[in-house]
Amino acid sequence: MKTFITISFLLTLLSSCSLTSVTMIKPNESFELGNNVHGKFSVKIKNLSDKELRLWEIPVQGGKHSPLDVLPNKTVKVKVDKNTALRIENHHSVSASVSLRVRGDIGLSMGYKNN
């Protein structure tokens, strides 16, 4: 019985450390995940749109690095360092949607910005 309780607790803990959502990004806007102080996290992103999207890693202290283009209907996995945001840019004249599965530190800020 003690083993069952321990396993149940661990499964609950692991499942509570993830976030799943479908996010819409307006034309010529970006969605930023984690523009605050936080630990490491990873994101599985599926581009649900018919246009290519660009990802950037943006350290809280400034700069940006590791550009990655996500083709329509493709999925990528990104590991993001602590205190670094992930920006998803939509440079098109139509809205875009992405499916996100976030694991690790989920105490992340979320917001939109104009490109």
Image (cartoon, rainbow, N blue to C red):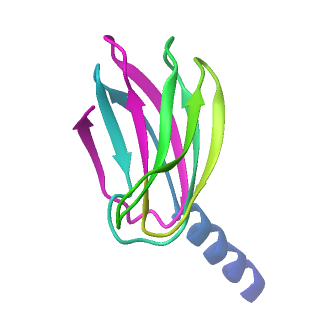
* Image quarter in which the N terminus is found: bottom right
The quarter holding residue 30 reads top left
The residue stretch that appears in magenta: 86-115
Foreground of the two, 51 or 97 = 51
Q: Give the residue at the far front of this rendering.
A: 63
Residue 26 drawn above or below residue 82: above
Q: Residue furthest bottom?
A: 2
Rendered view: 29 above or below 84: above
Q: Residue furthest left?
A: 114
Seen at 58% across and 17% down, the residue is 72
Quadrant housing the C terminus? top left
Q: Position of residue 47 (x, y in %)?
A: 54, 25
Q: Position of residue 17 (x, y in %)?
A: 53, 64
Q: Position of residue 73 (x, y in %)?
A: 61, 19
Q: Is residue 75 magenta?
A: no
Quadrant hosting residue 63? bottom left
Residue 58 quadrant: bottom left
Q: Position of residue 107 (x, y in %)?
A: 38, 66
From what the image shows, is residue 37 above or below residue 5?
above
Residue at point 72%, 76% (across, down)? 7
Q: Return the residue nearer the eye: 69 or 36.
A: 69
Q: Residue at x 58, y 36 (%)?
A: 68
Q: Residue at 51%, 64% (x, y): give it.
A: 16
In the image, is residue 94 part of the stretch drawn in magenta? yes
67 left or right of 1 in image: left
